[in-house]
Amino acid sequence: MSIPPPDYPKPRGLLLGKRVLFTAAAGTGIGFAAAKRFAEEGARVLISDMHPKRLAEAAAKISEATGTSTPSRVCDVTQEKDVRELIDAALERLGHIDVLVNNAGLGGSASVVMMTDEQWSRVLDVTLTSVFRMCRAVLPHMYERGSGVVINNASVLGWRAQAEQAHYAAAKAGVIALTKSLSAMLWKHDIRVNCIIPGFVRQAPARKPPERPQPRRPHARRAPCARRPRPRSR
């Protein structure tokens, strides 16, 4: 028997006055739900994504829910120029950056035998190398302020095997290892670096589903609550 989700918690001003930058925060997944919740808790957030229409819709929803304006910036985290311009825009709009949330990621399924170099490289570039790029760009600002927080979104697949997702699993394992290395390096500067490791989360597809439906994997049976959770924004 599955455990029903808890009631959506009321805001308590836990992040009042904080300035937070999110990557990949448009759409229906963890990024949008987290950005909205940060804003509800009093943070001033700037959200980014590579999809302009979805990004504008996400910013409008957060603004409507919180009664405050939500700045946004289109950014492809695989492009160094976009990353640098995103940091500059966040500093201009927010004044400073207290928290960076690295949420960008790209999945996919392919056996190692059939996987192309392009498939492998694309998943690692979006999911792992983007975290490195964002941290490299924001850390000088956090050094100057003498404080900061970086939150990286990893995955349970970073430490547990999943057939036909070697590229995604390797990328998320890399995010976990990168987080540990950064944390060991940055604590002396009063900069905290942590990662969250979500399980299998259900969300609406960003693109039209394939004509032939994919078989469902028994993810729910692996979850402690016996169900696949959904990102909640209300």
Image: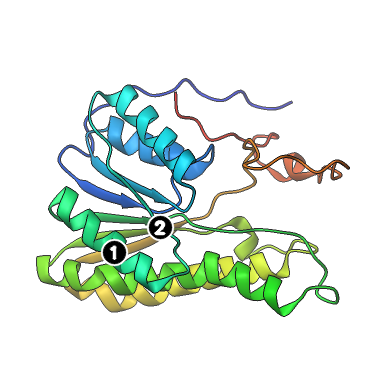
113 relative to 49, above or below: below
Q: Secondary structure at mark 1?
A: helix
The quadrant in which the N terminus is found is top right
Residue 202, position as x, y percentages in the image: 64, 38
Kind of residue sitting beneath label 2: Cys
Occupied quadrant, residue 65: top left
The CA span between labels 1 and 2 is 8 Å
Front-lying residue, 155 or 94: 94
Q: Is residue 58 left or right of residue 99?
A: right
The quadrant in which the C terminus is found is top left
Q: Secondary structure at mark 2?
A: loop
Q: How is the image coloured?
A: rainbow
Query: What is the number of the mark on residue 136?
Result: none
Looking at marks 1 and 2 on the same chain, the residue that comes earlier in the sequence is marked by: 2
Kind of residue sitting beneath label 1: Glu
Residue displayed at 65% across by 46% down = 200
Whether residue 183 appears in this view of the structure is no
62 relative to 107, above or below: above
Query: What is the number of the mark on residue 85?
Result: 1
Residue displayed at 68% across by 75% down = 118
Residue displayed at 43% across by 33% down = 57
Front-lying residue, 198 or 116: 116
Q: Which residue is mark 2?
A: 75
Residue 109, position as x, y percentages in the image: 76, 60
Few, some or many residues within 10 Å of mark 1 (<14, 14–19, 20+): some
Few, some or many residues within 10 Å of mark 2 (<14, 14–19, 20+): many
33 relative to 75, above or below: above
Q: Are marks 1 and 2 in contact (CB under 8 Å)?
A: yes
Residue 213, position as x, y percentages in the image: 85, 41
Q: How many marks?
A: 2
Q: Is residue 198 left or right of residue 193?
A: right
